[in-house]
Amino acid sequence: MQVAAIGLGSMGYGMAASALRAGHTVWGFDVNSAQKDKFRADGGADGSLADIAGSLDAAMVVVLNAAQTENVLFGDNGIVPKMKPGSVVLACATVAPEFARTMASRCAESSVLYLDAPISGGATKAAEGRLSIMASGNTESFAAARPLLDAIAETVFELGTAAGAGSAMKAVNQLLAGVHIAAMAEAMTFGMTQGVDAETFLDVIPKCAGTSWMLENRAPHIAKGDYTPLSSVNIWPKDLGIVLDIARNADFNAPITTAALQQFKAAADMGLGGEDDAAVAKVYARGAGLTLPGES
Amino acid sequence: MQVAAIGLGSMGYGMAASALRAGHTVWGFDVNSAQKDKFRADGGADGSLADIAGSLDAAMVVVLNAAQTENVLFGDNGIVPKMKPGSVVLACATVAPEFARTMASRCAESSVLYLDAPISGGATKAAEGRLSIMASGNTESFAAARPLLDAIAETVFELGTAAGAGSAMKAVNQLLAGVHIAAMAEAMTFGMTQGVDAETFLDVIPKCAGTSWMLENRAPHIAKGDYTPLSSVNIWPKDLGIVLDIARNADFNAPITTAALQQFKAAADMGLGGEDDAAVAKVYARGAGLTLPGES
C-alpha cells in the first residue's frame, strides 16, 4: 500500500519504519528536515507531499495536537482534498472526541475515510510495530486501514463505529497515566521525607496495593537519577490540558487531574519540559528541600 | 504463645482467627461485645484483659488510629505496664511514624518490645492469614513477634531496626492507594461523559498504561453497581488525613493527595461513609448528572 507518514517524532518515526518493514511504500514527512532525510536514508520513498497525495492509500498523521492535525488535513496545503476516494486517514494525535468527529465528517465530504486512532505504548513499541491503538470509525475505515494497522500495532481496540470513541478512551487513559506518574512522584518524595529511600520504595510498593503500571515503569528513573526522555514532561501539560478541556465542555469536575496538571506545569516552568516525565519528582523535591538520587 | 487480639473489626477478627488456627492461645477484645462473644464461640480464650495482661507473650493491636492505640497501651486500663519483660506489642493501625517511635520508647520503659507493624491486604487475606505487614523494630521485637507474624502474614517487609519505618512505608502505600481509587473514579465517570461505558473501560484500561492495582480491584464494583463495603469510604478521610498530617509536619506539599482526600470527604458528606470506597464515583456522578450502573 502507498502510505504517507506525517510526523516523524519518536512515535511517528517508529510507526513509519514499521510500515516500511511490512513492505509498504512509505513517504515520510516532518517539519524537521533532518528526520525526513533520515527516513529517506532508511528506505523511505521520494517525493513531495503535494505530488504524492493523490496516489495514497493511507495517510498516517502522528503530529502533536488537534491544530497540527487539522493543518495537515485541511490547511493551505492540506492533503484531504487531493486524496482519492476510499483512501483513509489514520489520525493518531491525542485530541478531543468532538474534534475527531468533525475531522471525520469533513473527510467524508471528500469521500476520504477517517479512522480515529490514538496510539499508546511509547517509542520502543512504536519502533517494534507493537503499539496499542484505541480505534473507532466505520467498517470501511477499519477495512481500508487494516494493512497499516497490522504493520504498526500489536493490539487494536475496536471501540465503535464512529470517530470520537477512540479519542474518548485515549483521554481516559491519559488522565490515569498522567495522574499516576505525578502521584508516584508525590508518594516517592513524601516517603523520602520520612526516611523511605528510593530503592526501598521500589522493593516494596510494586508488591502492594499502591502500585500502578506507571509507577513500575517510571519510579526506576528517579531511583537511578536518569531523566533521559523516554516520554517527556511536555507531553502532560498538553494531554492533561486536552482532558480538562473535554471535562470543562462536559461540566465535569476533575480535581485530581487538575492537581496533577499543575505539577507538570510547575516542572515545565522549572525548565524540565524536555526531561523524562519522572522529573516531575523534582518539583516535589525542590519544595521539600530533598536531594534526589543522582543529584549533587 | 499467649496472645491478646485487641480490636476485632474486619481485619482484626481475621488476624485473631488466623492466630488461633496456628495453635496459639488467643484472647479477643473489642468495644463491640458481640464481636468478642463471637470470637469466644470460635475458640477464643476466656478472661478479662486486666487479668491476662501479665501472662501475654504478645498483644496484637488492630484498632482504628493512634488515639485508640495509645489508649489500649497506656490509657487508664493500659496493658503495657502489666505486660511482662520481653513480651511484644504488635501495633497494626495506620499511624504517623513519629507516633510509632514514641510508643516504642514508652514500651521500652516497661521492658516491653514494640513492633511497628501496619498491615495491608484487606479482610479476605486477614482471614486467610495472608496479610502483608510493613514492619520495623529491633531484632528482639522481630524475634518475639515471629510466631505471630508467621500465623497472620504471607509477606513481612522488614523495613528497619527502629519503629517508624513501617508506618512511613504504610503511609506511602496509603497515599498511592487512596489517590488511585479516586483517580479511577474520576477517569471512569469522565469516560462516561464521553460515551465510554463501564464495561468498555474495564475491557481496555487494564491492558493499558493507565492501569493500577486499585483500578483493577475497585472499578468492577462500579461496573456491577455493588458497593458492599470490602473497604469503606470512611477509611480514606482517616488514612489520607494521617498522610497529610505527616506531610504538613515535614513541610511537604501533597496536592494530589489533598484533592483525593476532598473527594472521599465529599463522599462521606453524602452519607456514603459505610459503602465500599469505590462509591467515591458517586461524588463525580452527582456533580456531572450521570447515572452509574445499578442506579435507577
Image (cartoon, coloured by chain):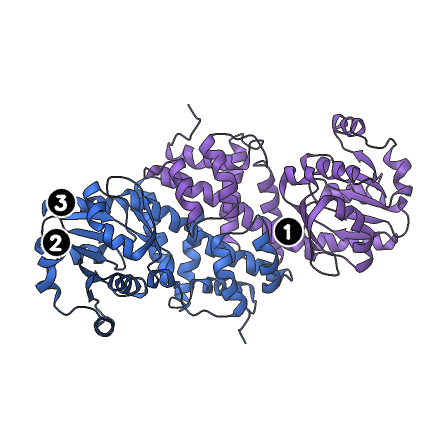
Chain colours: A blue, B purple
Q: Is residue A198 left or right of residue A113?
A: right
Residue B256 lies, in percent from the top left, at: 49, 51
Which is nearer the eye, B73 or A78?
Answer: A78
Amino acid beneath label 2: Val
Residue B14 quadrant? top right
Name the residue carrying label 3: A108
- Mark 2 neighbour density, 10 Å: few (under 14) some (14–19) many (20 or more): many
As helix, strand or loop, the secondary structure at mark 3 comes to helix
- Mark 3 neighbour density, 10 Å: few (under 14) some (14–19) many (20 or more): some
Name the residue carrying label 1: B170
User: Circle 1 marks a residue in which chain?
Assistant: B
Mark 1 vs mark 2, foreground winner is 2
User: Circle 3 marks a residue in which chain?
Assistant: A
Q: Are marks 3 and 2 on the same chain?
A: yes
Mark before the other along the chain sequence, 3 or 2: 2
Q: Is residue B116 left or right of residue A239?
A: right
Residue lying at 37% horizontally and 41% vertically, measured from the top left = B191
Residue A170 lies, in percent from the top left, at: 34, 48
Residue lying at 33% horizontally and 44% vertically, measured from the top left = A248
Q: Is residue A124 left or right of residue B61?
A: left
Residue lying at 58% horizontally and 60% vertically, measured from the top left = A202
- Which quarter of the rendering shows the C terminus of chain B? top left
* Mark pair 3, 2: CA separation: 10 Å
Is residue B187 positioned above or below B250 on the image?
Answer: above
Is residue B113 positioned above or below B31 on the image?
Answer: below
Question: Residue A80: which numbered mark, if any?
Answer: 2
Residue lying at 40% horizontally and 38% vertically, measured from the top left = B189
Amino acid beneath label 1: Lys
Amino acid beneath label 3: Ala
Mark 1 vs mark 3, foreground winner is 3
User: Circle 2 marks a residue in which chain?
Assistant: A
